[in-house]
Amino acid sequence: MLCTRRLGGLTARASALLPVRSRLGGFGAGLRARRVSTGWSPVGAAFNVKPQGLRLDLFGERRGLFGVPELSAPEGFRIAQENALRKTDLLVARACSTPPGPQTVLIFDELSDALCRVADLADFVKIAHPEPAFREAAEEACRSIGTMVEKLNTNVELYQSLQKLLADKKLVDSLDPETRRVAELFMFDFEISGIHLDKEKRKRAVDLNVKILDLSSTFLMGANFPNKIEKHLLPEHIRQNFVLAGDHVIVDGLHAESPDDLVREAAYKIFLYPNAGQLRCLEELLRNRDLLAKLVGYSTYSHRALQGTIAKNPETVMEFLEKLSDKLSERTLKDFEIIQGMKMKLNPQNSELMPWDPPYYSGVIRAERYNIEPSLYCPFFSLGACMEGLNILFNKLLGIALYAEQPAKGEVWCEDVRKLAVVHESEGLLGYIYCDFFQRADKPHQDCHFTICGGRLKEDGDYQLPVVVLMLNLPHSSRNLPTLLTPGMMENLFHEMGHAMHSMLGRTRYQHVTGTRCPTDFAEVPSILMEYFANDYRVVNQFARHYQTGQSMPKNMVSRLCESKKVCAAADMQLQVFYAILDQIYHGKHPLRRSTTDILKETQEKFYGLPYVPNTAWQLRFSHLVGYGAKYYSYLMSRAVASMVWKECFLQDPFNRSTGERYRREMLAHGGGREPMLMVQAVLCIKKPGT
């Protein structure tokens, strides 16, 4: 998953958040190469041992989170945001007084960078830092910067400085394609924020945006908040499967993998029981998004959100989803019959197929047919081995190596966070990836990629290195056992590293379009493509070694694993179609013709097929409605594109260096700096008609 956050006119573009132009010369020729540090160590070993703790340095300076000096304490967020806001004022004045030209776009991008460098970092810290004081300070910084951004989006003088550039055809024609696209993206974000409105309506747009930010934050917190039930209401023999707190049982998830039907049923009904406050929050969020869309000239929020994407409009999205659903329907019914047959076999007294059943029983079917018990696979997938596998793949495909680097005191928020330097064989240091991989209390359960700092070419000719965080939830190693990954965890690691390399492997002139800051339905392509590599025996054979014996994973084990993923795949994809259509309806025509729960019931029965369970409200746990509002279909569309890229480019040879270079040059290198379909056509070597 890519963590996304929209900042309005100065947008942190969706990532799961670069074109290479002739002036930059290929992959950055002419930029100063970063020297290799002697303090780096091999990546595999770094992840198979417990961290030794930070170096004892009684007199050294505490550097602050991510090396930002102000962030050695929570109060530093206020200093950082005040510095950013002061710089913003200076840059706004500069933008408004500079004659129109390429310099206008550079100033806008520097303005975007000044705000995003605080907001992006705070976006991560507010959900991931173990200390409440840091989380609260980061939350306030997000709100402060977000409010400023919305005001800038409706600043008429700032808008006019960009408009003068884009209204001058001679000037526009003189811009290189990347600069022109970035200028148009800034203008587009002004327009969808209501810059064309009168003063009173512009203020209304700002107020709505700020309210939406607050509602989004509240909804996200509520989506993950556990439910509780009085202990006596649950059968005694299943209580031990949940957290007990006095006279109550706490349920914090769906327990989808539990072999006990009653545990799964209880978890489903309790965790998804409607919360009145969360329901009001969702209704308010959807209503305010619709009000904002209509205020700035769109018929629905979905029409506004899909501008600039591959799909372009909700009509195309619905056509795509309905066609996909039609193609899946027959296979989905067969999958449900197979799943129900397994349930009947194991639980003949209660064989009706319910929504809490498919994840567990499809897993049982896979295990029975293909003998893919995780305990057989985990010993071959130590975390260190998997990281070394990624290192081997990137080295062969792209000439890139990953090295572990010792973080400075105060640089990381938890001692088990690893810092990786990404180094190209000729270009040197490309950027940094912070790996927050291990479970801890109060850490979100989702696997995510966060942009902390976007890459850009600075005025002095130096390059601002990209910095990202990958967040997973892996078990800790022990004295005798390294962290061992299930096949699913290994695939997730490859997926998230796909986002990270998208962020690392470009050299855009502008941070506004760096890495994963591209249309959402394109941003998942590189990460989903990495899943294909993770399921190819030629790749897996490079690193899957038994942590005790060193034995390679037998080919038939990888084959069985890959075949097992086809089991009930149609039903799994049909579920995603249901979620995506639900998202489109919620962000479609308002007022909604029914309650969000009634819409859920109707959509589930039409586009998934399993019955709605009374007194449940799954939509209140649908956290992607915030970051992927009206864009949840992006996973499915990106998967279709990634499948084409894999088949055409890498299926024959997943280590082909020239193909890897083309993939970087034509796709990864451009971030959001080119139209997505142009990048796809280029990497697939599809010529435009007439050429």
Image: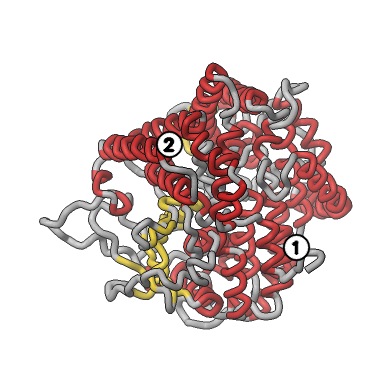
Name the quadrant of the C terminus: bottom right
Amino acid, disc 2: Cys
Would you identify the image quadrant in which residue 45 lies?
Answer: bottom left
Which residue is drawn at the image coordinates 39% and 73% (left, top)? Answer: 428
Left or right: 183 as drawn, with respect to 149:
right
Left or right: 24 as drawn, with respect to 335:
left
- Residue 636 visible in this rendered orientation of the protein: yes
* Disc 2 versus disc 1: nearer the observer: 2
Which residue is drawn at the image coordinates 77% and 51% (left, top)? Answer: 571
Farthest residue, direction top:
200
Q: Please tell me how crowded label 2 is: few (under 14), some (14-19), or many (20+) other residues with Cα within 10 Å.
A: some
Farthest residue, direction left:
59
CA distance separating discs 2 and 1: 57 Å
Which residue is drawn at the image coordinates 36% and 44% (left, top)? Answer: 129
**Residue 654, above or below 143:** below
Badge 2 element: helix
Q: Which residue is mark 1?
A: 566
- Residue 16 visible in this rendered orientation of the protein: no
Q: Which residue is mark 2?
A: 96
Pick whichever, 342 or 640, lies toward us.
640
Q: Position of residue 500 (x, y in %)?
A: 50, 60
Q: Position of residue 18 (x, y in %)?
A: 53, 59
**Which of the two labelled residues, at mark 2 and mark 1, occupies the earlier sequence position?**
2
Q: Please tell me how crowded label 1 is: few (under 14), some (14-19), or many (20+) other residues with Cα within 10 Å.
A: few
Would you identify the image quadrant in which residue 433 lies?
Answer: bottom left
